[in-house]
Image (tube, helix red, strand yellow):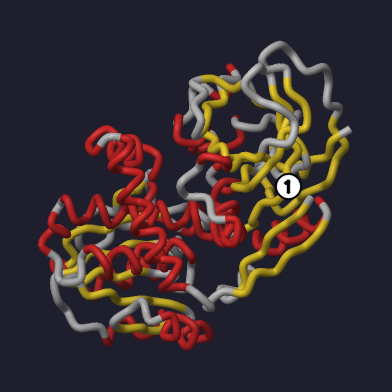
Amino acid sequence: MSQAVYVTRDNPSDAKTVDVAGGELSEGAVRLKIESFAVTANNVTYAVAGDRFGYWNFFPASGDDGIVPMWGHAVVEASNHDGFAAGERVYGYIPMGTHLTVMPGKVTAHGFVDLAEHRQPMSPIYNQYSRLAADPEHDPSKEAERMIFGPLFKTGFLIENFMRRENWFGAEAVILTSASSKTAMGLASVTKDRSPGTRRIGLTSAGNVAFVEGTGLYDEVVAYDHVATLAKVPAVSVDFAGNAGLLAAIHSHFGDDLKYSCLVGATHIEARGGAFGGGEKMAGPEPVLFFAPDHAVALFKDLGPEEAAKQVAVSWHKFLSDVDGTVAVDIRNGIDAAREVFVSMMGGNVDPSQGIVIHP
């Protein structure tokens, strides 16, 4: 018997732990026992934007309930596939639960794709799993950091890659809201390394200013209510906060100097206002939603899998050096701990100096 956290899809703060029958393992299938995963604001985005982007479809629950996807490590518990034996460890997209059954296909020494029929309509990026024994990104001493930062860092990498290919739309500075978030930190690190001529301005809550300044990733850090103090130069904004009022203030302040407005994540869709239709039109450019999986597919198509992976790995190791010591890993045990942390994050309780890892 396995367990999973079921949340009410239209009210993800309503969550419960349930027992789930495992069933017989079909031919070619592999049952994974989940060892660990991180719970971050990214998972809140998966829940809040679940219907819009299909996140509920990866790990179906029942009725009005859904299972929130996580990123983490698992070990083969049972196998009906000749290429996998019990004890092998993998990394990838997993449910907030204790087990996952996959149908491995396109198997190589480095990884495989889950060919389960219900997952094929979604982005292939989420269906790929790494086999840790031959995974060049795997570092046994950095497993927690990979779960906490990895998916969010890659979104930051893809944003910088996109902006740089567009010559930053002629901007001199990039304004990052929710600058304490792990995705923003990833973007700031990659920009610092690959686009050093672009000034990095972090916006954050007054209580997080000291933390954000302490990361050393930003040229300037400003509290949300001080947007009007920013120098009016050609700029692009990357909004991770999802607060329509804040975004409108940025647009109003910069006006035509705002060359591009990028929306990332959707942790507060109801606060997006005009960004998703409805509400008054803001000054400056129309905000554009950034969907990382599409950009990932484009990156791998442009550079080829090997070169793309190499570039990501170089920036990833640079990022780990940049954030070393900024976030303390908090390990909690049991699937109920995952439920409690997730509900707390749904309520907006996210400590940027803490990275929470669950051992279910």
Query: Which element type, helix, strand or loop, lies under badge 1?
Result: strand
Q: Position of residue 158 (x, y in %)?
A: 33, 50
At label 1, which amino acid type do we have?
A: Glu
Residue under the point 69% across and 39% down: 67
**Residue furthest left in the image:** 170
Residue sitting nearer the eye, 108 or 58:
108
Is 120 on the left-hand or right-hand side of 336? Answer: left
* Residue 196: quadrant of the picture: bottom left
Residue at label 1? Answer: 35
Query: In which quadrant will I find the N terminus?
Result: top right
Q: Is residue 233 above or below residue 260?
A: below
Q: Position of residue 300 (x, y in %)?
A: 31, 37
* Residue 141: quadrant of the picture: bottom right
Q: Position of residue 155 (x, y in %)?
A: 40, 52
Residue under the point 57% across and 25% down: 114
Neighbor class of circle 1 (other Cα within 10 Å; few <14, some 14-19, many 20+) is some
**Residue furthest top in the image:** 27
Is 315 on the left-hand or right-hand side of 13? Answer: left
- The answer to whether residue 64 shows anywhere in this view is no
Q: Position of residue 216 (x, y in %)?
A: 38, 82
Q: Is residue 252 above or below residue 114?
A: below
Residue sitting nearer the eye, 85 or 196:
85
Q: Is residue 270 above or below residue 248?
A: above
Is 278 on the left-hand or right-hand side of 137? Answer: left
Is 260 on the left-hand or right-hand side of 292? Answer: left
Q: How many numbered marks are there?
A: 1
Residue under the point 49% across and 21% down: 106
Residue under the point 28% across and 74% down: 200
- The answer to whether residue 38 shows anywhere in this view is yes
Q: Is residue 121 above or below residue 177?
A: above
